[in-house]
Image (cartoon, rainbow, N blue to C red):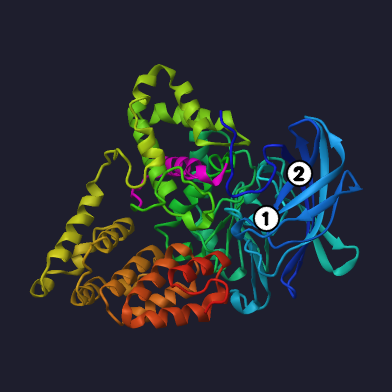
């Protein structure tokens, strides 16, 4: 097998492995920095080993030691999103199989992309500041110098007063299960919790904790279902943290404490799907991990497959340059390639293989075996495919007929579209067709009864179909839709975002302030980016979109702000 190249890392992951990580951090809210000390227990993979490289970005490095002895170090030049390599020369030489403890004392930057510091005014309680991290994909290096390998961190293990400063408290955490460094997570704030199951609690500011406990009551049921499919849940605790509105994603599967967006608290139709997805990551992503970000589909494709074994919904990604299942990230920031492709196209491949191999019972046997085979390690697409052929050795002739190049390395839609049950989608399509074909004189024929029997998922699909139309609906149509369906009064975030996008694309001016309000009152990129883009593309309000973005830029997560700035053609460093 060819050696693995990682275009997103400088680290020496082919020369050594991190076997343990001991991390000490002190949060300074006044300076918006973390002061830290990390001790990496490194296993050597080659003889005559005397140097290694760690990934860093925007870190101040004060001191490096190896087994307690001072070590020479040098920070290389900054290289865009990759940051700066920290080259360390050991004061001795090691052989294959030996271990060394490399300790680094450092400080983060106030602009570290992994960290978002919130003022009291930006929180629900308005009294205390708040800090949270988001390390996927490559942002951990702005918080902790690291290797692209397995590490340990995170179950709560007590607290005590700081003996050097009585105004501070030391919180201790431990994690016996190895995991990748991008899953290191940190949150500091005025948090409360409620028990929602025998191994689960929901955490948030007190203003939202009871609502969160109500919303996520099915967590234990979904955990048990996932265990029946994929094997034992090895992480012990499964807690949920409801973050402030600027959190840029629907959820982040940090082991033992999944981070989720507060938009789920007003979107009861969508939260079970998000939680099922994050729970599924406990096996595919956290237990078995993509080796590099070019193989991200291994995380997300399998996770969507497991999620939909709990409850399936289907859709496909767009046809664009980043729609290869295995992408080339040479010189490319992985954040800029984040899309539905690894999720949906990856799921479609697995669903196709399920049909070819003999159905869900047969194929889930492979998925479970794959998880057991590669547990506690990271995997490439080539390794996954080799194991697939090994597991189904009696069906190699069928597997050889799969268009692997078309699936993995060709942009666009999958080379084969699995056949799904379209009964529910047909009703959505029929209503969408009525609206797209209707003349102004026909609008009186629509009524509230049209959507009375449609579920929230079907309403989402109905609006999504209208958004896909090349020609936007006339303004008269969306005005009539509001009269009969009253979409403006729906708080479900998935429905509301699509509805407001539809209105803006139809150039209904009354919808523009509502769209910008939703784009800024929460920061989930799934909603914020398309809303800003649509207003920007409404020529009359282009300047207004840029103005509102600049006014709210500092409230957004750094990744969100960077990508919205790119969408609106605003300078990404100055906001001008």
| Label whose residue precedes the other's in the sequence (2 or 1) | 2
**Hey, which quadrant is residue 307 in on the image?**
top left
Relative to residue 353, is residue 112 depicted above or below?
below
Q: Which mark is residue 360?
A: none
The residue indicated by pointer 2 is 52
The residue indicated by pointer 1 is 141
Q: Is residue 327 left or right of residue 254?
A: left
Q: Is residue 24 left or right of residue 362?
A: right
Give the residue displayed 39% in from the left and 20% down from the top. Answer: 396
Q: Is residue 534 magenta?
A: no
Give the residue displayed 62% in from the left and 57% down from the top. Answer: 139
| Magenta segment | 292-317
Q: Main secondary structure of the magenta part?
A: helix
Question: For the residues marked 2 and 1, what is the alpha-carbon distance in whole angstroms?
Answer: 15 Å
Relative to residue 313, is residue 416 depicted above or below?
above
Give the residue displayed 23% in from the left and 73% down from the top. Answer: 478
x and y percentages locating residue 130 in the rendered image: 66, 70
Q: Residue furthest left?
A: 441
x and y percentages locating residue 563 in the rendered image: 49, 66
Res 105 visible? yes
Q: Is residue 315 magenta?
A: yes
Relative to residue 161, is residue 297 depicted above or below?
above
> Callout 1: few (<14), some (14-19), or many (20+) C-alpha neighbours within 10 Å?
many
């Amino acid at each position: 097998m060819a050696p693995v190249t990682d275009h997103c890392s400088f680290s020496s992951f082919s020369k050594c492995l991190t076997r343990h990580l001991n991390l000490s951090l002190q949060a300074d809210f006044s300076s918006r920095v973390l002061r830290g000390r990390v001790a990496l227990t490194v296993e050597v993979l080659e003889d005559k080993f005397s140097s290694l490289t760690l990934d860093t970005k925007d870190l101040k490095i004060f001191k490096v030691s190896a087994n307690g002895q001072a070590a020479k170090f040098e920070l290389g030049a900054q290289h865009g999103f990759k940051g700066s390599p920290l080259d360390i020369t050991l004061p001795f030489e090691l052989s294959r199989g030996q271990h060394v403890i490399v300790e680094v004392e450092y400080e983060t930057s106030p602009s570290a992309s992994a960290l978002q510091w919130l003022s009291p005014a930006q929180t629900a309680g308005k009294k205390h500041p708040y800090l949270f991290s988001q390390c996927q994909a490559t942002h951990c290096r702005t918080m902790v110098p690291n290797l692209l390998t397995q590490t340990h961190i995170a179950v709560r293990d007590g607290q005590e007063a700081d003996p050097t400063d009585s105004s501070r408290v030391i919180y201790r955490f431990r994690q016996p299960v190895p995991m990748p460094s991008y899953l290191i997570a940190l949150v500091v704030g005025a948090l409360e919790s409620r028990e929602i199951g025998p191994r689960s609690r929901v955490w948030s500011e007190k203003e939202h904790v009871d609502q969160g406990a109500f919303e996520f009551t099915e967590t234990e049921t979904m955990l048990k279902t996932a265990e029946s499919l994929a094997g034992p849940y090895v992480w012990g605790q499964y807690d949920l943290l409801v973050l402030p509105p600027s959190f840029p994603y629907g959820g982040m599967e940090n082991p033992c404490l999944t981070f989720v967006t507060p938009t789920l608290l007003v979107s009861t139709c969508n939260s079970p799907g998000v939680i099922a997805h994050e729970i599924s990551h406990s096996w595919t992503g956290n237990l078995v991990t993509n080796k590099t970000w070019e193989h991200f589909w291994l995380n997300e494709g399998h996770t969507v497959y497991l999620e939909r074994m709990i409850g399936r919904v289907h859709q496909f990604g767009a046809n664009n340059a980043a729609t290869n299942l295995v992408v080339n990230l040479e010189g490319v920031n992985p954040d800029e390639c984040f899309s539905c492709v690894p999720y949906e196209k990856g799921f479609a491949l697995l669903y196709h293989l399920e049909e070819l191999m003999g159905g869900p019972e047969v194929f889930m046997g492979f998925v479970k075996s794959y998880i057991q085979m590669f547990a506690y390690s990271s995997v490439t697409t080539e390794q996954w495919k080799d194991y697939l052929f090994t597991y189904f050795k009696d069906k190699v002739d069928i597997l050889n007929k799969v268009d692997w190049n078309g699936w993995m390395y060709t942009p666009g839609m999958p080379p084969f579209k699995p056949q799904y049950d379209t009964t529910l989608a047909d009703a959505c399509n029929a209503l969408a067709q009525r609206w797209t074909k209707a003349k102004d004189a026909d609008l009186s024929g629509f009524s509230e009864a049209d959507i009375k029997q449609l579920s929230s998922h079907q309403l989402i699909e109905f609006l999504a179909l209208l958004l896909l139309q090349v020609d936007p609906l006339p303004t008269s149509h969306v005005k009539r839709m509001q009269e009969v369906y009253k979409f403006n009064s729906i708080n479900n975030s998935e429905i509301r975002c699509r509805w407001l996008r539809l209105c803006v694309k139809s150039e209904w001016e009354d919808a523009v302030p509502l769209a910008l309000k939703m784009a800024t009152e929460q920061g989930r990129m799934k909603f914020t980016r398309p809303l800003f883009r649509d207003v920007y593309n409404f020529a009359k309000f282009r300047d207004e979109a840029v103005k509102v973005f600049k006014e709210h830029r500092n409230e957004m997560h750094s990744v969100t702000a960077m990508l919205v700035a790119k969408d609106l053609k605003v300078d990404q460093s100055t906001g001008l």
